[in-house]
Image (tube, grey):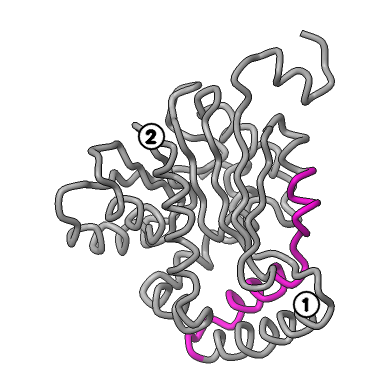
Amino acid sequence: MDKEAAARRPLFRMFNEVPERYDIMNRILTLKQDERWRKKAAKLCLEEDPQSVLDICTGTADLALRIAKMTKSKIRIIASDFSQPMLDVAAQKAQKLDGQQVEFVLADTADLPFGENTLDVITIGFAFRNLTYKNKFASQYLSEIHRTLKPGGIFIIAESSQPKNPVLRFGFRLYLKIWVQWLGGLLSGHSKAYRYLAVSARNYYSPGEVRKLLEEHAYVDFRHNSLLGGSAAIYTVRKPESRSSECRVLSAEC
């Protein structure tokens, strides 16, 4: 791994250490709400009637496998991650699939091994925060996702969010502090990993800030679906259909 790639991967060691208990911890810490949220994201994906879907930062591939289980058509589903241990767990889970299969690719989201304008849909389940929260390479990730999407292609993001209601926001932050950080660290044996999860979620962007970030990187048609009182959300944006519309977003000359 070169120095630049290493710099882009401050969480690399952490994710390599947690895959065996990753799924069960997600279920415990969200009271299985994460499964419902991924199902909603998968439904949005399949409403596009895609021929190709890429799930980036796939981890143990919960979202990619959910899409595979729900699709009624034979489509190409690819799941990529920079952690081989995570992909190993994902591949074991994929053996239970009947019919539709998922391709697993070891890849850095900043350097995806796909051509320009090739993918109908790109999804990410609760890892967008890792790419963009206090990450100096955020623009590189967002540009690479944009590059590989087809014109008109959709980017679907399931992520933690910030409740507008001050009482709900207080409760959400208390939950992160006690349930996620303390209990997650205790049960998993990886206190640093769950401290990062709690702190990054507690301080992550509001829907308005997410919209601004995405529109600054030439995405259009922003939509926000609030989940569980605003503690989570599904965001969707598109790559512009034409170069001229992209230029208007960027306020640049073509």
Q: Residue at x 80, y 69 (%)?
A: 164
**Magenta-span inclusion, residue 129:** no
Query: Is label 1 in a helix, a strand or a loop?
Result: helix
Q: Residue at x 69, y 51 (%)?
A: 132
Number of other residues with Cα within 10 Å of mark 1, as a class: few under 14, some 14 to 19, many 20 or more? some
* Residue 57 placement, left or right of 204: left
Q: Residue furthest left?
A: 98
Give, as a single range, the part of the protein colored magenta: 187-212
Circle 2 sits on which residue? 50
Q: Nearer the viewer, residue 220 or 109?
A: 220
Number of other residues with Cα within 10 Å of mark 2, as a class: few under 14, some 14 to 19, many 20 or more? some
**Location of residue 204 with respect to 169 vertically, above or below:** above
Q: Give amino acid for label 1.
A: Arg
* Residue 34 placement, left or right of 62: right
Residue 220 in the image: x percent, y percent? 68, 33
**Location of residue 119 with respect to 72 vertically, above or below:** above
Name which quarter of the figure residue 231 lies in.
bottom right
Q: Nearer the viewer, residue 1 or 207?
A: 207
Circle 1 sits on which residue? 169
Q: Main secondary structure of the magenta part?
A: helix
Residue 190 in the image: x percent, y percent? 53, 81
